[in-house]
Amino acid sequence: MNRRVRRKVSRKGKEKLILPSYLEIECEIADLDLKQTVDWTCLPDDTVIQLFSCLNYRDRANLSSTCRTWRVLGLSSCLWTSFDLRAHKIDAAMASSLASRCNNLQKLRFRGAESADAIILLLAKNLREISGDYCRKITDATLSAIAARHEALESLQLGPDFCERISSDAIKTIAICCPKLKKLRLSGIIDVNAEALNALSKHCPNLLDIGFIDCLKIDEMALGNVASVRFLSVAGTTNMKWGAVSHQWHKLPNLIGLDVSRTDVGPVAVSRLMSSSKSLKILCAFNCSVLEEDAGFTVSKYKGKLLLALFTDVVKEITSLFVDTTKKGENMLLDWRNLENKNKSLDEIMMWIEWILSHNLLRIAESNQHGLDNFWLNQGAALLLSLMQSSQEDVQERAATGLATFVVIDDENASIDSGRAEEVMRCGGIRLLLNLAKSWREGLQSEAAKAIANLSVNSNVAKAVAEEGGIDILAGLARSMNRLVAEEAAGGLWNLSVGEEHKGAIAEAGGVRALVDLIFKWSSGGDGVLERAAGALANLAADDRCSTEVALAGGVHALVMLARNCKFEGVQEQAARALANLAAHGDSNTNNSAVGQEAGALEALVQLTHSPHEGVRQEAAGALWNLSFDDRNREAIAAA
């Protein structure tokens, strides 16, 4: 669903230790007597637990294995109140092994139907929040079983992928089994009928936040009976009867925020809702073409109520919510977070606004609509950057993904909008993204690295990334054991390596070794990471000094392995290009002969010249041409 740039470029040491990029806190230790022996096992327990809390699960487990005391501390219940398992495929065996740590688990994030099936085996009876994505294959049976096993559930979110196999029957089961439910957000349900909605109204008296997003059909009248709802989103939902909506929903006594973005709502329904509802404060209507085409529609007459849309000043509208407006600025969300006098009601509203903004801006960016340049340059980019500083991790991730997406014009041809990219840079976005990339949370690392990669197609942004220390950060992320993180980091190095001025810095940061190691680590089942790693090595190999680094790091063997064994055309093309560039320095190093002498190299390249993919054929032919300048290679090519 998310678009990312796939960079393709024409053919034309010293290794530094990089600290693990997941550390979020920089420690400064002054006046340390290096001769003094430090017994780390004597650290106070609470200090060790705090250290554990700054690590991802994998590193936490590794640190726990150092001694018996730390193993016990690593099992402390306070460290296992939240699980983000999206980077892992959770099967029954793994879920059973984790069950002993889940007694106090309260928050869980997962990915995919297989992981959803295993959730009930975690035995996490105290689970309060469940959030899942890539849920297209999740069935009623699975969702009903999850609801039945977790009666204390307060929040359930599935999306943004369409939950096509979930029906109203599962929603009814959720209502009956989870009476403490406060938040329910589901995407892509085919039909949300009256029976399901009436069950929610009857059994979930605390249900405050409802989202039926990108659904095909909703019973509008029944939804109007859920009197407890304060925040409601039907963004992207089709077949809405707006006459019924405007006559029924304005009666909802507690409704504060309503999101009708990406629907065909018109000015009549919007006017009636804003004028008739006594409780409604915010109506979000981004990308509503019928409303936007009505030149006579104005919002100024609805005093005390906000309309957030492409044609309104979103920052000004949101800032008007603040009681203390003495410190107004472009970053209104940061202004709210810094308010001295906290207001619980305002905090709830702002948290919801952050969520719907991040969701809608990402959806709009993915649609790649024409005619939105002014919005992105004047408001959109700044809003995404502000959302990146949210306290909600999922909002931060979507904002970073939005930045990665909205700059892309044509992902196949590596084309981005320079104006948008440089606006992100002008607003301080590079530093914000790099800070996110240094988070210990792998979801943030992945999305931040993706945004950095796409923005770095612009040479000015690439320069800024390098100047801000981004090359070291990306090289560190490329060492991640999380494939998604490593893949996006490799993509960033691929785009940065286009610039001649960055090649040496990548080598100095240990990027060459990290990229070669990626190929061996993900040699099977990781076409995306392999293509990016090979593409980056191809760019680096065009430089004489870096080509030597590639060979010394085992790059010849790694690239030949890809050329021989990988069936994905993108990987084949980049591997052949990298070998061609390695062989192009016959006068200055021995890489030409090294490639020719690598077992199976020439045969693989000859075979690739018969590929149905033109790019693969061209790169393989170019590699053979360069290799043929060596007499022994020329004879071997003829024999092959």
Image (cartoon, rainbow, N blue to C red):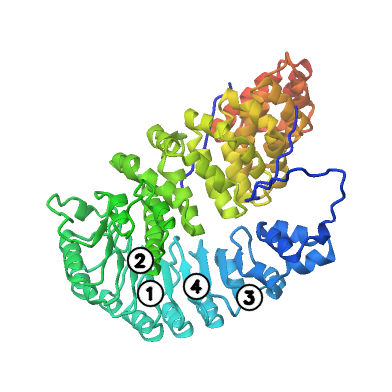
Q: Horizontal placement of 621 versus 374: left or right?
A: right
Q: Amino acid at mark 1?
A: Leu
User: From where the camera sits, is residue 207 visible?
Assistant: yes
Q: Position of residue 229 (x, y in %)?
A: 34, 75
User: From where the camera sits, is residue 5 visible?
Assistant: no
Marks 3 and 2, how far apart in space? 34 Å
- Judging by the rendered image, the residue that carries numbered circle 3 is 104
Q: Horizontal placement of 71 versus 256: left or right?
A: right
- Judging by the rendered image, the residue that carries numbered circle 4 is 139
Marks 3 and 4, how far apart in space? 27 Å
- The local secondary structure at tag 3 comes to loop
- The local secondary structure at tag 2 comes to loop
Q: Nearer the viewer, mark 2 or mark 4?
A: 2
Identify which residue, 167 or 601, lies in the foreground: 167
Q: Residues within 10 Å of mark 4 (few under 14, many from 20)?
A: some
Q: Residues within 10 Å of mark 3 (few under 14, many from 20)?
A: some
Tell me: residue 199, above or below residue 277.
Answer: below
Q: Amino acid at mark 2?
A: Cys
Identify which residue, 209 or 211, lies in the foreground: 209
**Mark 2 vs 1, N-terminal side:** 1
The label on residue 208 is 1
* Residue drawn at point x = 14 percent, y = 59 percent: 301
**Mark 1 vs 3, N-terminal side:** 3
Q: Nearer the viewer, mark 3 or mark 4?
A: 3
Q: Amino acid at mark 4?
A: Thr
The label on residue 215 is 2
**Mark 2 vs 4, N-terminal side:** 4
Q: Amino acid at mark 3?
A: Asn
